[in-house]
Amino acid sequence: MAVNILVNVLLLGFLGLFFLCKGQNTSVSLSPMKKKEQETLYSVIQGFIGKEWNGSDLYPDPCGWTPIQGVSCELYDNFWYVTVLNLGPVFDNSYICTHDAQFPDQLFKLKHLKVLSLTGCFLSPTQNPVRFPISHWENFSNSLESLHLRSNPGLVGTIPSTFGYLRKLQSLVLLENGLTGELPSNIGNLVRLRQLVLSGNHFVGEIPFTYGGLSELLILDASRNDLSGALPSTIGFLGSLLKLDLSNNFLEGELPRELGRLKNLLLLDLSHNKLRGGLVGTLEELVSLQHMVMSNNPIGGNLLGIEWKSFQNMESLDFSEMGLTGNVPESMAEMKRLRYLDLSNNNLSGSLFRSLENLPYLAALHLNGNNLTGRLEFSEWFYSKMGKRFTAWDNANLCYIARSMLTWTQTPHGVKLCVHETSLFEETSKMKTNDKDSNFMSSSGSSRCISYGFWWVLNVNVVFHVFIWNMSR
């Protein structure tokens, strides 16, 4: 009886769920896409992936029962409208753009489009160069929130100034394309931007000072371009910024003091530029910073003007090839979370302090190519822990002290043994050699005595047997 009741309850629950789902699907089917919107969508897709695609398998509409991969829709007045268009090899079953893909004019008729993402759609800058449409971007002024174009070397030309109409844009990613020209200053008017990635193109000219108006920006990445000129002081107004990467450009001049205003910054990468004038003292105000890379800049100056203990969140610090002079301040050992420190290929001098060994997370320390002097007094445990991640060669007047006479394998590669240690080592080795020689001579002498005795007995034995043999005759 109880079993029958349980079965009936489960059956009723299943039927209720079935009709609920059926009702939801009925509402979907009752909310079709307008024919004009559908024709526009099909035309746009054909412009990117080829005319042979006709969507005939997408009945009754491309947003209901059989949605298109990479296309999402939302309801407006009980009709489906396209809000997301994502083409390229992003998912396993994504539509791949054809070799002669273009920006179709119909694209700008998708009036509710929020996200446009094209990856690997324009591959050849010689056989099929494609440029951004200059006009019609104003059609997206009230809708487009995200515009991403990645890995499109065939996308050439400049960023159209009409991007300035995209006032709702929150994310602009133009990564590894073939774009050229100067950065439009009116991008600074897109005050809702939270992500601006322009990396891996061929942009030239200065960073517009108007970009300082992007107060909500979290990520600014314009690395791997041909940008020049000085860093604008207005960059200090980007108070929300978490990542600033301007590496691999031709930026010059001094570091602006206003960098110190970026209190939330986690990553600062200005490497491989032409920056000069020394390290600005306001850097120590970047108290949230975790990664700072300044390498390959002729910055010059020294490390003494900064309170390194301010960087309690610092994990990696790369100051290699910067023309730095002077001593390495002991306060650098107060960055307790430091994992990676590279001061290689500078003109640093003076001796090195052993307290670096006490940094609990330190996993790489590069000091090679400087003018450091004195003794390295790190323990063999430290050398063993670091292995090849500790480098101190090319410091002519630097030597190391061996803490143990038993283990000579854990030593800093390319660094000579200190003179006192060398004498001690040679004396110990000589004593061991003398002991070996004495033992050898003793053993050799004994062997010779045994050998001579053996041959004497043998000769006597032979003579005796000859004498007996003659007597018997």
Image (cartoon, grey):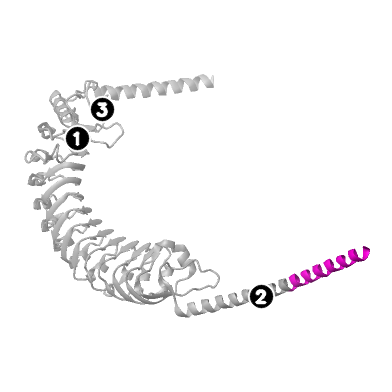
Look at the numbered discs 1 and 3 and tell me whether their residues touch, using CB distance below 8 Å: no
Q: Position of residue 173 (x, y in %)?
A: 20, 46
Residue sitting farthest toward the left? 135
Q: Earlier in the sequence, mark 2 or mark 1?
A: 1
Q: Which residue is mark 3?
A: 67
In the displayed structure image, the side of residue 38 where residue 380 appears, left or right:
right
Q: Main SS of the magenta segment?
A: helix
**Front-most of 235 and 101?**
101
Q: Amino acid at mark 2?
A: Met
Query: Which quadrant would the N terminus be assigned to in this image?
Result: top right
Q: Amino acid at mark 1?
A: Thr
Q: Which residue is mark 1?
A: 83
Q: Is residue 257 magenta?
A: no
In the displayed structure image, the side of residue 380 where residue 76 appears, left or right:
left
Q: Give the residue at x 35% y 61%.
A: 315
Q: Earlier in the sequence, mark 1 or mark 3?
A: 3
Magenta stretch? 449-473
Label 2 element class: helix
